[in-house]
Image (cartoon, grey):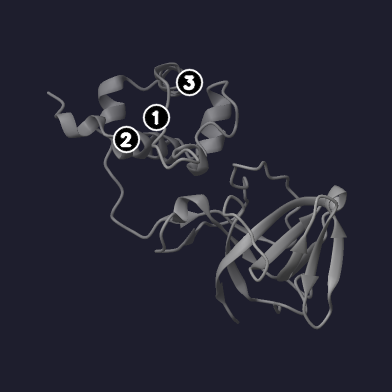
């Protein structure tokens, strides 16, 4: 008989992650196989903006079980992963994907483990070449959040609609543009901005 602790929020999401790993898939690939939106199982979807935990729907669970040929008992008894720091997507400045206002990037490559608060709402950006210069150098690794509010004085990373990047201290943001201060100040029209993320932590190379 299954014990009650099998039905906690963390246990259900861990089971989805475990099912994806068992079939050699990422959570987003598992969602697509089940005919769901690719972002259905994003870590950013598991907690709402107000901090309330979101549960996957029974319909979503039924679809992934059907798509993988897994019965409910097996699903709920998948082994839990060892306790480790939360993992987050890790992208490089060569990445050219899009990002919704409440989504994490569907990033290629390995995840980055970061033991900080709300790590499941963050992602790591690895600077390559001079993409983030002069604020950051080749090899620097930044943990950022695209859902954290940004204010003047915050360190931020900008991803531009044309695939370019910019980074620095946010000096001013209006309805039309975003202005970065620093040794090479820069103003970016918001129409040319794909997203802005607040820098929470940096590992210098």
Residue 8 vs residue 205, the one in the foreground: 8
Q: Secondary structure at mark 2?
A: helix
Q: Is residue 157 above or below residue 176?
A: below
Q: Can you say which quadrant of the picture contains the N terminus? A: top left
Q: Is residue 132 left or right of residue 49?
A: right
Which residue is under mark 3?
A: 67
Q: Secondary structure at mark 3?
A: helix
Q: Residue at x 83, y 60 (%)?
A: 164
Which residue is under mark 2?
A: 9
Which badge, 1 or 2, comes first in the chain's sequence?
A: 2
Residue 192 vs residue 16, the one in the foreground: 192
Q: What x and y, as percent, mark residue 137?
A: 70, 79
Q: Residue at x 73, y 55 (%)?
A: 95
Q: Is residue 202 above or below residue 17?
A: below
- Discs 1, 2 touching: Cβ within 8 Å: yes
Q: Is residue 75 visible?
A: yes
Report which quarter residue 110 is drawn in.
bottom right
Q: Residue at x 81, y 65 (%)?
A: 179
Q: Secondary structure at mark 1?
A: loop
Q: Is residue 161 visible?
A: no
Residue 24 vs residue 175, the one in the foreground: 175
Which residue is under mark 1?
A: 55
Disc 1/disc 2 C-alpha distance (Å): 6 Å
Q: What x and y, as percent, mark residue 182?
A: 77, 79
């Amino acid at each position: 008989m299954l014990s009650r602790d099998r039905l906690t929020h963390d246990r259900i999401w861990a089971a989805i992650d475990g099912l994806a790993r068992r079939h050699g898939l990422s959570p987003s690939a598992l969602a697509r196989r089940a005919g769901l939106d690719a972002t259905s199982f994003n870590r950013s979807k598991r907690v709402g903006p107000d901090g309330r935990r979101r549960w996957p729907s029974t319909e979503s669970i039924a679809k992934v079980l059907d798509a993988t040929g897994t019965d409910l008992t097996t699903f709920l008894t998948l082994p839990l992963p060892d306790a480790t720091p939360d993992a987050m997507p890790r992208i490089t400045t060569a990445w050219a994907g899009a990002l919704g206002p409440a989504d994490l990037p569907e990033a290629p490559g390995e995840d980055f483990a970061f033991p900080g608060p709300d790590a499941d709402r963050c992602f790591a950006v690895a600077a390559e070449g001079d993409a983030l210069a002069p604020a950051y150098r080749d090899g620097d690794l930044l943990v950022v959040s695209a859902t954290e509010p940004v204010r003047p004085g915050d360190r931020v990373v900008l991803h531009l609609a044309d695939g370019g990047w910019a980074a620095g201290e946010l000096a001013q943001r209006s309805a039309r543009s975003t202005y970065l201060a620093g040794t090479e100040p820069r103003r970016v029209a918001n129409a040319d901005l794909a997203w802005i993320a607040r820098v929470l932590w940096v590992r210098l190379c």
